[in-house]
Amino acid sequence: MKLVVRVKLLPTPVQAAALEATLHACNQAATWAAGVAFEENARRPLELRKHTYAEIRVRWQLGAQAAQHAIKKTCDAYTTLKANLRNGRYGRPGTRRHIRAAGKPIAFRPQAAQPYDDRMLSWQHEQQTVSIWTTAGRLKGVAFTGQAGQLEVLAAHRRGESDLVFQGGKWFLIATCEIAEAAPNSHPAGFLGVDLGIVNIAATSDGERHCGRRINRKREQDRKLRSKLQKKHTKSARRRAKKYAGREARRNKDINHKISKRIVAEAGGHLPARAQPRA
């Protein structure tokens, strides 16, 4: 089973500047590579590497691993675009939206996430620091923090690549962890059924209901706030709208997580007792 753990980096101002410059360089290189891939119709890593690897190394001063990751990120983006076009994500072929998506090269945001492998990133779990490659050299002793449970999972099960992310003015590393799955219980003592819905987010077979009134009420408030800010067309309104971007999704995720934990706790706490035979 694969899980992702997100830890927050605590870089100094000098370290943060180096990380920002690295993201910009990697994404500029990936955007240029995407243009070459579009013109040359070279959208596989090995093929695109022949056209772009040497120039990326010289032009953006990227290390060997960083250059290869920029190329692979470009190819992965085209693979995703192809799948979305095939599945109708951009409408039918021939429509304006479909033509606009397929008719131009992919471009990456200056602060888009950048993958790191073990050659570019090493973890010191006891000190809660990382050593990370940047265009300004390798940064050592970059502090990170996170919840105790997440840090334990990270130290014991981290495998593969990690993504460097800049979001909301803060730096994060998103690491992939592989955890062995426990053997399924083939002889359960009981069960609890769960029905999902909109009015009631979840209703269990023992009559417990978890309503969605709070989510719907907050969603309506957010809709009115967005409409109000969009009508103003001022810098402060745009700044405030950006601040609240994603707030609804984060709130819903938090509420759903709490409901699911409550259901699991209820099932674990009451089912064994109910499974006992009655006199």
Image (cartoon, rainbow, N blue to C red):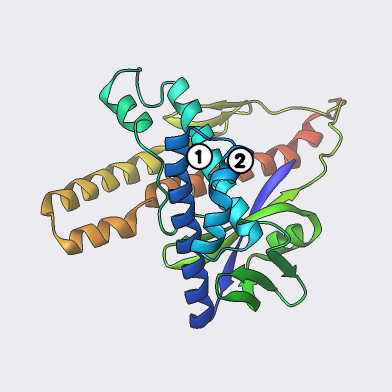
Q: Residue at x 65, y 59 (%)?
A: 64
Q: Is residue 194 left or right of residue 165?
A: right
**Disc sitting over residue 45 in the figure:** 2
For the point 62% across and 51% down, the residue is 68
Residue type marked 1:
Ala
- Image vertical order of residue 225 relative to residue 148, above or below: above
Dot 1 corresponds to which residue?
A: 77
| Front residue of 179 and 189 | 179
Taking the image as shown, residue 278 lies to the left or right of residue 73, namely right
Residue 151 shows in this picture: yes
Residue at 74%, 42% (x, y): give it: 269
Residue 234 appears in which quarter of the rendering? bottom left
Residue 214, horizontal then vertical, whole percent:
39, 43
Which SS class for mark 1?
helix
Q: Nearer the viewer, residue 278 or 239?
A: 239
Pick the front one: 234 or 81: 81
Q: Position of residue 46 (x, y in %)?
A: 64, 40
Query: Where is the C terminus found, in terms of image quarters?
Result: top right
